[in-house]
Amino acid sequence: MWLVAVTATMRRWVDEDTVSVSIPSYDFPHSIYDTSKVKRGRQIELTGEVTRIDEDSVTIALGPLVAVAIERVRLKYRAPKRRNAPRRQGPPSVGGPRGKTLRQVSER
């Protein structure tokens, strides 16, 4: 999971709690829920999870999916990689030509 941030510019108020923003390299209007009294032209940081990475664009989940140019995105958080835990060994084998495990021998 990668969380990334995009800087958007506030365009206008749609409602008393909804703001229309302009996202660079995204050619469609985008609205967000915002209760703070942001003024027109102010920069807002939008954070979302990366869903797809292409050659020159990144798709981010900001409610709807938004495709933005890679150079407009900043990495906020990257989940740590999981270390491979050592595999658990089964019960030791009982000697003999058949090589049965202890569990197979005890079930007899």
Image: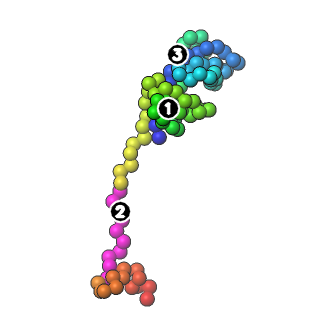
Q: In which quarter of the image is residue 78?
A: top left
Residue named by callout 1: 58
Q: What stretch is highlighted in magenta?
A: 85-94
Kind of element beneath mark 3: strand
Q: Is residue 93 magenta?
A: yes
Kind of element beneath mark 1: strand
Give coordinates of residue 43: x percent, y percent. Answer: 52, 16
**Three-letter amino acid code at the position of disc 3:** Gln
Looking at this view, name the residue that lies furthest to the right.
15
Question: In the image, what residue occupies the spot 40% across and 85% down?
Answer: 106
Q: How crowded is mark 1: few (under 14 residues within 10 Å), some or many (20 or more)?
A: many
**Three-letter amino acid code at the position of disc 1:** Val
Q: How far apart are marks 1 and 3 (CA)?
A: 20 Å
Residue named by callout 3: 43
Q: How far apart are marks 2 and 1 (CA)?
A: 36 Å
Question: In the image, what residue occupies the spot 35% across and 54% down?
Answer: 84
Give coordinates of residue 53: x percent, y percent. Answer: 48, 36
Left or right, residue 105 beside residue 10:
left
Q: How crowded is mark 2: few (under 14 residues within 10 Å), some or many (20 or more)?
A: few
Q: In which quarter of the image is residue 80?
A: top left
Between disc 2 and disc 1, whose residue precedes? 1
Looking at this view, name the residue that lies furthest to the front.
55
Kind of element beneath mark 2: loop
Between disc 1 and disc 3, whose residue precedes? 3
Front of the two marks 2 and 1:
1
Q: Does the magenta stretch include residue 64?
A: no
Colour approach in the figure: rainbow
Question: In the image, what residue occupies the spot 31% across and 86% down?
Answer: 97
Q: Residue 87 carries which label?
A: 2
